[in-house]
Amino acid sequence: MTSRESISMNQQHHQDKATLLERLIFNNRPVVIGICLLVSIFLFWQATLIRPSTSFEKMIPLEHPFIQNMLEHRNDLANLGNTVRISVESTNGDIFSKEYMETLRQIHDEVFYIPGVDRSGLKSLWSPSVRWTEVTEEGFAGGEVIPQTYNGSPDSLEDLRNNVLKSGQVGRLVANNFKSSIIDIPLLESYPDPQDQGKQIKLDYQAFSHQLEEKIRDKFEAQNPNVQIHIVGFAKKVGDLIDGLMMVAMFFGIALVITWILLYWFTWCIRSTIAVLITTLVAVVWQLGLMHAVGFGLDPYSMLVPFLIFAIGISHGVQKINGIALQSSDAENALTAARRTFRQLFLPGMIAILADAVGFITLLIIDIGVIRELAIGASIGVAVIVFTNLILLPVAISYVGISKKAIERSKKDATREHPFWRLLSNFASAKVAPVSIVLALLAFGGGLWYSQNLKIGDLDQGAPELRPDSRYNNDNSFIISNYSTSSDVLVVMVKTKSEGCSVYPTMAPIDELMWKMENTPGVQSAISLVTVSKQMIKGLNEGNLKWETLSRNPEVLNSSISRADGLYNGDCSLAPVLIFLNDHKAETLDRAVNAVQEFAKEHNTEDLQFLLAAGNAGIEAATNDVIKSAELTILILVYICVGVMCMITFRSFAATLCIVLPLVLTSVLGNALMAYMGIGVKVATLPVVALGVGIGVDYGIYIYSRLESFLRAGMPLQEAYYQTLRSTGKAVLFTGLCLAIGVCTWIFSAIKFQADMGLMLTFMLLWNMFGALWLLPALARFLIKPEKLAGKQGGSIFAH
Amino acid sequence: MSEPVMARAVQGAPRGRAAPAALAASALLALAMGLFANTVEAAKNDDAAKTIYSQTSDKASRSLLIDVVHAGPRLVAVGDRGHILFSDDQGSTWTQARVPSRSLLTAVKFVDDKHGWAVGHDAQILSTDDGGATWNKQFEDLTREAPLLDVWFENTQHGIAIGAYGAALETTDGGKHWQDIGDRLDNQDGYHLNGIAAVKDAGLFIVGEQGSMFRSSDNGQTWETVQGPYEGTLFGVIGTSQANTLLAYGLRGNLYRSTDFGTSWDKIALQGVRGPLEFGLYGATLLDDGSLVLVGNGGTVLRSSDDGVSFAVVNRADRLALSAVSGLADGNLIVVGQGGEHAATATGAERAQP
């Protein structure tokens, strides 16, 4: 083992030079601990103040023309506002029964008193405002759908049935199959405090959502076993999302426990295990505290940053402990071992963290607030790790030391033969390497071919944020299938001059647009003031179907839209056209958007413009657009950055290829996996590319830097690789596991996109580790000439 | 329980008897119209240059249809956006005709299996001489701002079209020229003329708004005002297989029968599921066996096998408003209205499409 001894000598040689930074830190250890303690106390206080934030604007690409149009006309689109709908289903017969109507009445009354409900707009069959109308010889006749005389008798139930038919509420308030009816609840974003009328309280979505569950769903389903309650609406969705976030906190606990166990298995030392966990938790606290200090809240995306920071922190901590344990075997005390490890690992640690940060920073080019906050939050987080795990941890270990047992173990490890690593070192052999390369090429080609199936956007029905089988999405599909509405709405804004929305030259093209859209595949129906106008003109002509069309008479037309509340703005210069879509898949959105754009191109004039887009489908179309254009840019940027980092670190093109090519394979296979799993490229999965590559490059850097130093010592490739594996293989394997465990708990998140992110990140991190262990040596076999490196000091910044 | 609101709003808006709010708004609109006047003119010139045809759509047979008739064995239906559909297999499949219109068409009549006329909004009159496959525009008058609502033809040359605000047009050359004959009727209030029909061995009969009735014994040369039995609006009229006998139908299930060409009337009682039927009746047809079928709001289908003395009532489960009905060779029915064409059994109930 002469070669190994020469390396120890070599290491010994340059480990005696203490850098300025090292002296600064280790000569002032109490100060370092003190400062960290003070900072921790301050940032812990800050971290306790952090709150879930669900700002709508941060979720959307604000610079996109669709969104700009929407924001410009936001006040005119007020009607498309914030409502919750409760559908009360009768599981036993139809809604025309005494018991059902009584339960419906009680629910209506209960909802009335929930804070945040806009009582004046509350609508159900029991509202006096829900009326039927009929044309009689004298003109219109009408009345409340449930008249004052209603008493639940068979006769009054039959009256009710007829009134419902005459009210035009079938498909809206009453299901098409008469087995459920809806309570429509408009919400106030802020409402007066009942104690102090002068004060406004902001609507708390989570509390509101909980009240709906307790006071409505649980209570009335228990009270009347023949009803089932379905609740949908933005507020309910956000409430469920926040609940999902709370669950994520539990995942953090699980990840913590698993990591603890793994860490102990790795170190066999309870002291260093606790030291690593605590310093890493300190990193998480700092990161959260700093997030709040710079004014960010916790949204469903940035919620994931603490996990990443925790995982990255642990992996660096493990490298440190590994190093200190090795050093402890020949250092006189813990302090010396810690100092030597600091000296040896600070630089590669910094490089790895820089690579992470660079990966995160590229995300800034995506014009979506939550992603930018994720990028900034994660960058802050990895910067924090420099302080906690690269500085604080060695200092802490220098006090507590590492247990004798652990040192014994690492000593034994360093000298004994490892059959497992010996076996793996074959990846670098002349026989196995070509096979590996061919396999990798096949996997690359196959992955590339299969990832053609990759789709942009969300692919599932219902609210994309939640799982397809979540209660919210079940409720949503119940309402979609039983009422004539869809939850995917694309809104086209028709802009005219003031008072221009109700004239024939505006309304006729709107009518034409609606028909064009209704004939576009994926469109269910369209609604605008034209819809109301036609009904009204028919109504003014005694309900005669022969009049159900637009009139060229300006007065008729103008008065016909008087009841089209919310379908035109105050000065009649903007009229939204609501286009209901089957789903929000990218093809559906593309087809609808293209149809509108085609129409707009033909019909836009100075006085009449068809502008895209509002509504959730409009926002989604804009988001898809941004993602489509950012997807490739991000990928290229990340690889350029990582490549440059490697070039700077190793000053070798061949080395850069050895490290980066396995990552490329991972990216391609990742895309294929997404296509296979039916996960679309969307706001949630785009960051995974950058995160996966940024973090994944760590393995390559650790392995290659070791491999290179053994090659310089003159070893043949396979032997050098065996030595690399023996010293860092376990740490790399462990790092991969730590990172994967940190993120794989997300797979169980109630929030769909978190689960998707978790799945993809777990795959990317594990496969990147595998790629580094398997493919890197195979590539090195072809790209690196050991004889050229042997004995040279080389250009790498690790070679001092 | 039932309270009249907006009494007489029915005739309000079109004749300048609009509510004050509408008046205020209409002042603004007058301004807007001035601004748009040029564009409207320009559009007209374009129309002359290139005819705009109705669009072919898979949804045409599922969107609003107003009338359905036979052209020999073929069925022809007209409706929204200039849609004219024809079926040669008893309504199983429909083909869209080439039609130079995008207006709502309100009525269609054929005098034989080739020659037919359709009328509609923008006072359009369209004609076909190939059994409804292709159509020509014979007449259009945008300035009326009102639709034609029904059409009758005696033969391939002579016909009359009627419509809103008392419009009446006549042709004696198969539609090459149309002449305004509105002043032949004593209709000073300009009531809408909703339906026109020939009565066997008697002459022509027109019904309209406010229960107005007119009859002509000389093929439309002179018209006599008839004192009707009802003051609500009548939507249509149909002659039965018996001489001098006709039915007039309208709002809220009002159905009247006369056996003396409208001199005296009997109200036909219609019994709904609970109490008297109160749905408006919009269309009627006389079947080959002399049965009469009427359709209307709330999915109402009425059938009489005693020349209209009594009717059996069916309300289709979907309750969609129906506008017209036609008999099929196998004794079943086809009804049209909201949601396009629907198959029906002989009584009017739902029938699965073959």
Image (cartoon, coloured by chain):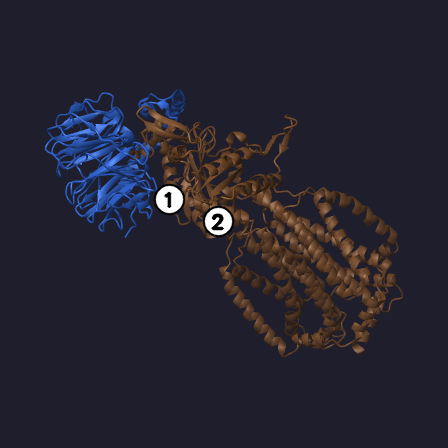
Chain colours: A brown, B blue
The secondary element bearing badge 2 is classed as: loop
For the residues tagged 2 and 1, is the chain the same? Answer: yes
Q: Is residue A668 above or below residue A436?
A: above
Quadrant (top left, top right, bottom left, bottom right) of the N terminus of chain A: bottom right
Which kind of residue does numbered mark 2 sit on?
Answer: His
Q: Nearer the viewer, residue A744 or B272?
A: B272
Relative horizontal placement of residue A317, taking residue B261 as reference (left or right): right
Residue B158 lies, in percent from the top left, at: 13, 35
At 63% from the left edge and 79% from the top edge, which residue is drawn?
A: A431
Q: Quadrant of residue B344?
A: top left
Mark 1 lies on residue: A516
Q: Residue A675: which numbered mark, if any?
A: none
Label 2 Cα neighbours within 10 Å, binned few <14 / some 14-19 / many ≥20: many
Relative horizontal placement of residue A413, taking residue B265 as reference (left or right): right
Residue A84 lies, in percent from the top left, at: 53, 39
- Whole-number angstrom distance, CA of label 2 to CA of label 1: 19 Å
At 70% from the left edge and 45% from the top edge, which residue is drawn?
A: A291
Chain letter of the residue beneath label 2 in the structure image? A
The answer to whether one can see residue A85 in this image is yes
Chain letter of the residue beneath label 1 in the structure image? A
Mark 2 lies on residue: A584
Label 1 Cα neighbours within 10 Å, binned few <14 / some 14-19 / many ≥20: some
Relative horizontal placement of residue A434, taking residue B33 as reference (left or right): right
Say how many tags the image has: 2
At 29% from the left edge and 30% from the top edge, which residue is drawn?
A: B252
